[in-house]
Amino acid sequence: MFELRVRPRFYETDAFGHINNTTVSGWFETAREPLFEIFAPTLNPTALNLILARTEIDFIAQLHYGADVVIRTAIEKIGNSSFVVVHEAFQKDVLAARGKAVQVCFDHQTQRSMPLSDSYRQQLEAHLIQQDNTAR
Amino acid sequence: MFELRVRPRFYETDAFGHINNTTVSGWFETAREPLFEIFAPTLNPTALNLILARTEIDFIAQLHYGADVVIRTAIEKIGNSSFVVVHEAFQKDVLAARGKAVQVCFDHQTQRSMPLSDSYRQQLEAHLIQQDNTAR
Amino acid sequence: MFELRVRPRFYETDAFGHINNTTVSGWFETAREPLFEIFAPTLNPTALNLILARTEIDFIAQLHYGADVVIRTAIEKIGNSSFVVVHEAFQKDVLAARGKAVQVCFDHQTQRSMPLSDSYRQQLEAHLIQQDNTAR
Amino acid sequence: MFELRVRPRFYETDAFGHINNTTVSGWFETAREPLFEIFAPTLNPTALNLILARTEIDFIAQLHYGADVVIRTAIEKIGNSSFVVVHEAFQKDVLAARGKAVQVCFDHQTQRSMPLSDSYRQQLEAHLIQQDNTAR
């Protein structure tokens, strides 16, 4: 699990007076940057072998301009060539949005998905949520 | 079902050379404008009694700068105070993204959800996808 | 002179209830697309030998959600390797914003500016504002 | 003079592989937040009696994803109802963009500009660039 603190920007608000929903998808992308660094340590876009296959966001409470937002990010599942990221955004300790992103390891040259290498997999596992198996 | 044609904008691309994923959530919001007009015929934001509760987007093919995108939008389900919108984005006849949005009828004054009035419901039903019941 | 008609998008508004200023710089970039097509007829970004050196925008009247905006674009001046574009944005026939952009012909490979070829120059001249010289 | 450190976001890049120009206008708006707090200490948008009248940006060097950007902001001039803000954006100690913004004290209720109060003026003066008059 890791955290990103973002300061809402005025242009990210909308006419309802709150942060627009499209902003949250941008914040969540930004929150995944530590995962991007696993694939491209210097964040050179041409070396970033990842694409986004799916996003889900639940908007739970309004987000406001004028107070920091803390985004907690972890990995829920690691597949053969993809992994599922989970995000939670808090403002003043209130859970305001929750989301998922499915990222796929992808060779931009050949335009095909690639299996996650052992090295990638190991680094991703460091952020894997511990599953509670006691009840099973 | 209704359609929106959008012209990708250069600033909507990203360093991968394609349209960034966050752009699609903005296009889908824009595609819902005919539904917003049911709630606020002049599109005055202070009269727009709607909030967004959830979005889902599947990114199926890359979207490029330089060719129009057609977004087909319909309503999948109408609940008591909310409804589910479905979107499909095509570029050069290829389905590139598919999404859902859950919109909730909401009183910004009292900050509470409201049941959909009969008038709203009737206008929303005009865009409801016909369900195929033959197999049941 | 050429025109672009844009429909303001809800996410382009801000908490003041109007279109945010940063949106206008995006609309003006979009309004320059016919000029981009001179440099890259298929709008392939890797063939688009242009960079932006300067922008100026005067915000004259508020821009609102719910009514189309017409952007008139022309070329004010053509230099050796650069040209100056002028934009005017009207909503309901009111001039709401006016801007300039200095674009430079640029070789992304060598990372250097290039003189405008005769072919580029001729096509740009078609959009050059006619200067009134009668008083001189 | 005050500073804002921003981390470029992936969606702020464009197909040229760099930060898109429209992003910089958003960063500069964000860099003015300490000035917004003079007018609205809690950053409540309805209390923020300011509008933007003009922006200018010079794009001097390319801005890249993967390295922080430091934005230095100061006030160049204070008028009767408006003031001129200057910004400089540095990445890895290279000046990459320079801009100006003219902000006007504005009553959103009456839709008119207002003279800057003595209290506002005093707080703005704390950020006024010292002019060197020795040579005159």
Image (spheres, coloured by chain):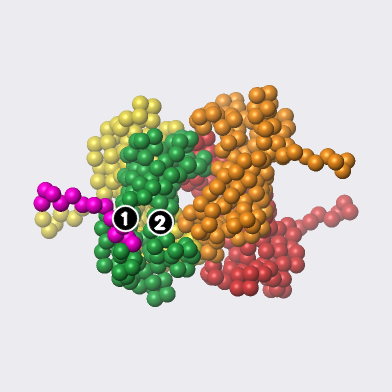
Chain colours: A red, B orange, C green, D yellow
Is B37 on the left-hand or right-hand side of C58?
A: right
Q: Quadrant of residue B55?
A: top right
Is D127 on the left-hand or right-hand side of B90?
A: left
Residue C3 in the image: above or below residue B126: below
- Residue C124 belongs to the span the image colors magenta: yes
Q: Residue furthest top?
A: B118
Residue D134 in the image: above or below residue A17: below
Q: Which residue is mark 1?
A: C127
Q: Residues within 10 Å of mark 2 (few under 14, many from 20)?
A: some
First to last magenta residue range: C123-136
Q: Position of residue D119 (x, y in %)?
A: 31, 35
At x 74%, y 63%, the residue is: A78
Residue type at mark 2 is Pro
- Residue D109 belongs to the span the image colors magenta: no
Q: Position of residue A57 (x, y in %)?
A: 65, 47
Say if mark 2 contacts mark 1, CB within 8 Å.
Answer: yes
Magenta-colored segment: predominant secondary structure = loop
Residue B14 in the image: above or below residue D102: below
Secondary structure under tag 2 reads: helix
Sequence-first tag of 2 and 1: 2
Q: Point out which mark residue A28 bears.
A: none
At x 67%, y 44%, the residue is: B86
Q: Which residue is mark 2?
A: C34
Q: Position of residue B110 (x, y in %)?
A: 60, 25
Q: Residues within 10 Å of mark 1 (few under 14, many from 20)?
A: some
Q: What chain does badge 1 belong to? A: C
Report how far apart the C-alphas of labels 2 and 1 lie in the structure.
10 Å
Residue type at mark 1 is His
At x 54%, y 29%, the residue is: B41
